[in-house]
Amino acid sequence: MNEHCLICDQMLKRHLTWTTLLFPSEQPVICERCEGKFQLIEGDICQVCGRPFQELEESYRKGEHCLDCVRWEENEGWSGLLRQNRSLYLYNDWMKEMMALYKFRGDYKLSEVFQRKWVKLYQAHYDSSYLVVPIPLSEERLYERGFNQSVVLANFLAQPVHDLLERHHVEKQSQKTRKERLETDQLFRVKNKAALEGKSVLLIDDIYTTGTTLRHAAKGLSEVGCKSVSSLTLARG
C-alpha cells in the first residue's frame, strides 16, 4: 500500500472507515492538499460538451448549450455528430501541470490519481451497451510518448476496448484557427466498419478543448453507420 502522495510525496493521512477496511483500494493515493487543487466539474453544464456554466458569462450561454456548441450545431456539416461529452475536471493550471506530467513525461503512474472518480463518472452517464473506443495517437506521437494516455483511461473502465480508429499525423489542432480546424481533412480512418454499424460508441480522450478532434472521429464513425457517438474526457478546457 502506498503511504505517500503520488504527487508531492507527503505522508498520507489514513482514515479508517468500514469502506476503507473492506475495500483497501478506496484509500486515497494523494494528499488532501493536492486533491483540493483539482476542480471537479459539477452543477449546471452545457448539455452537449459538458462545460460548466459557472465558469462562463451569461452571454455565452443559450438555453442548455454554450455558444460553441450552438455554432457546431448550426453548421450543417457537423450538426448532431457528437451526442454529448462528459468531463471529470476543469482544465485549470493545476490540471495542466498534472497532464504534462502524465502525458508528456511518461509518468502514467499518475493515472491512479484519477482512476476512482473517472470510473464513477463513466458509470453515472454510460453503460456496457457503448463500444469503448479510445482516440488514437498518430504513429509519430505514439513513438514520442511511448504510450497512449487515452488507452490507459479506457482500460480503467473494465469494459472491452475497441481499437477501431487510425489517426493521421497532422499539425496539432490547438495551433489552428477555428476556420482552419473546420476545414481540416478527416483526421481518422475507420478500421472495421462492420463492427460499428448500428452501435453506440463512447470515445475516450484526455482533454476536450475545441471539440474538433472528437467531432472528426464522430464524423468518421457516423459515416459507417454508427447509431450515436458520445465521449468521455478527463478534462474540459
Image: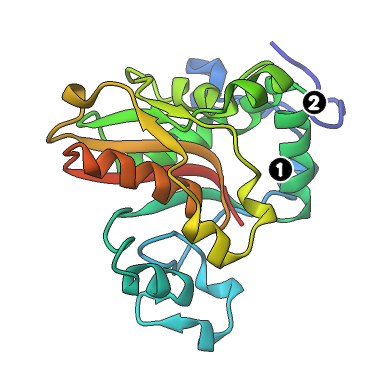
> Residue 87: image x %, image y %?
49, 49
> Residue 36: image x %, image y %?
72, 49
The residue at the far top in this view is: 1
Viewed as shown, does residue 133 lie left or right of 93? left
Q: Does 120 sit above or below residue 185?
A: above
| Residue that numbered label 1 is attached to | 35
Quadrant where the N terminus sits is: top right
Seen from the viewer's position, the closer of residues 3 and 218 is: 218
Q: Secondary structure at mark 2?
A: loop
Q: Does 59 sit above or below residue 141?
A: below
* Mark 2 neighbour class, 10 Å CA radius: few under 14, some 14 to 19, many 20 or more: few
Tag nearer the camera, 1 or 2: 2
User: What number is the disc on residue 106?
Assistant: none
Q: Kindly report the distance in space between the C-alpha atoms of the residues bearing marks 1 and 2.
A: 21 Å
> Residue 229: image x %, image y %?
28, 45
> Residue 147: image x %, image y %?
63, 18
Seen from the viewer's position, the closer of residues 12 and 176 is: 176
State the residue at coordinates (65%, 30%). 113
| Identity, as a three-letter code, of the amino acid under mark 2 | Arg
Q: Does 86 sit above or below residue 202?
A: below
* Mark 1 neighbour class, 10 Å CA radius: few under 14, some 14 to 19, many 20 or more: some
State the residue at coordinates (71%, 43%). 35
Seen from the viewer's position, the closer of residues 231 and 37 is: 231
Which of the marked residues, 1 or 2, is nearer the chain's N terminus?
1
Seen from the viewer's position, the closer of residues 74 and 113 is: 74
| Residue that numbered label 2 is attached to | 105
| Identity, as a three-letter code, of the amino acid under mark 1 | Glu
